[in-house]
Image: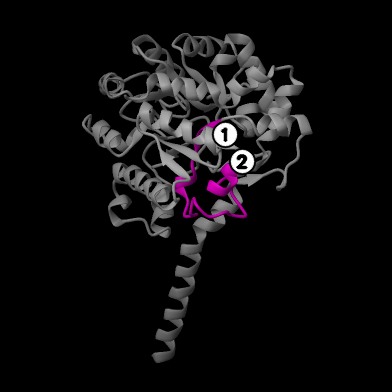
Amino acid sequence: MRKLLLTLLILVLIGAGIFFSLPSLLDRKMNSVAHPAPYHASDSAEKLHDSLFVADLHNDALLWQRDLLDRATYGHSDLPRLLDGHVGLEVFSTVTKTPRNLNYESNAADTDNITLLIMAQRWPRATWTSLLERALYQSQKLQQAVADSEGRMVLIRTRGDLQAFMETWRRDPKHLAALLATEGLQPLEGQLDNVDRLYDAGFRIAGLTHFFDNEVGGSAHGLNKGGLTPFGHKVIARLEQKGMLVDLAHASKALIDDVLKVSSRPLLVSHTGVAGTCPGPRNLSDAHIQGIAATGGLIGIGYWETAVCETSVGAIVRAIRYTADKVGVEHVALGSDFNGTVHTPFDTTGLAQITEGLQRAGFSNTDIAAIMGGNVQRLLMRTLPE
């Protein structure tokens, strides 16, 4: 009997070891790069890149158990590597639920991959059953990293915060501004007042949907792919009242159409491709590119294959060029989707390769500065709460 109990204990310990090591194994496997660092660009591109304020509109690092302040040897980014890549502003998004057998075509909302992942990462028990608590916990993770960063990272909540940060950054670029965003508004859990809870926790960008339809509206990957629900209309009004940017990444075509009709503020697509260079369920049509630009908004071009149809700098630049030619350089930005279970050409230390690609594509230095981060800075100075 004693041997049996000992054997069972050993098996339990082995199983627990495998379970708790699984997130790290998944992170290493699913957040990969085509080529390892170091990355090289031309001398002129490196010189120009080192003068740029670089901004990235989408990063899912908060989902994983890596410490943002420590340099990792896997995944796409952390504070040391962001600073090495000359990134001045990063939008950190909060993933709260993804469906099993996730795909780009059609997903139901009745399953969830994230619960076991967060249990294995020892998140607080409240997050096991509440999507709102998952979002709030990730905001706490970011705020703790900011507090522990010795001033190298600053959470941006207001225009004043960003203005003060820019003055600091101009003196010393080894600083990072951080913004909080949601990957879908399922954390509202159907309650309008939860918009206020997200706002109070520091969220300033709200992605409406992720890989499934929710109470707000349809996903490009959902079952129904509908437009704004009656609840969704109330949510848009509350988001605009709070001064939060609406993000249409992953939104269904009907949802994009509906939001374009009712929105009175600039709209954002944080990480996407465009159908003109890479057809796909979530990549923007020319009409939607033009509609979003007409609001004064921005389109963040992604780096992964489904967004741009190749894992290459050239494909990223082609999507940027196409979008700029359609609506103007002032409406284009970067939206990496780093750490979002994507395979990319490089990690964040390789961003000078995009600068070089833009030079080769004939963009001026002024245009490159706008695309690489100036447009994001301008939009936030216009739309953040005072």
Image check: 235 left or right of 315? left
Residue range in magenta is 54-83
User: Which x, y percent locates residue 51?
Assistant: 64, 30
Q: Amino acid at mark 1?
A: Ser
* Figure quadrant of residue 370: top right
Front: mark 1 or 2: 2
Q: Residues within 10 Å of mark 2 (few under 14, many from 20)?
A: many
Let me know if residue 278 is in the magenta part: no
* Figure quadrant of residue 262: top left
Residue underneath mark 1 = 336
Question: Could you give the CA–CA distance between mark 1 and mark 2, rounded to whole angstroms?
Answer: 9 Å
User: Which x, y percent locates residue 27?
Assistant: 55, 52
Q: For this rendering, which residue is in front, 94 or 101?
A: 94
Q: Residue at x 32, y 56 (%)?
A: 124
User: Which x, y percent locates residue 141?
Assistant: 39, 49
Q: Are marks 1 and 2 in contact (CB under 8 Å)?
A: yes
Residue underneath mark 2 = 348
Which labelled disc corresponds to residue 156? none
Q: Residue furthest bottom?
A: 2
Q: For this rendering, which residue is in front, 384 or 203?
A: 384
Q: Amino acid at mark 2?
A: Thr
Q: Residue furthest front?
A: 171
Vertical arrangement, residue 26 with respect to residue 377, above or below: below
User: Which x, y percent locates residue 89?
Assistant: 50, 34
- The reply to whether residue 286 is visible in this rendering is yes
Looking at the rendering, in which quadrant would you find the N terminus?
bottom left
Q: Residue at x 46, y 79 (%)?
A: 10
Q: Residue at x 46, y 63 (%)?
A: 20
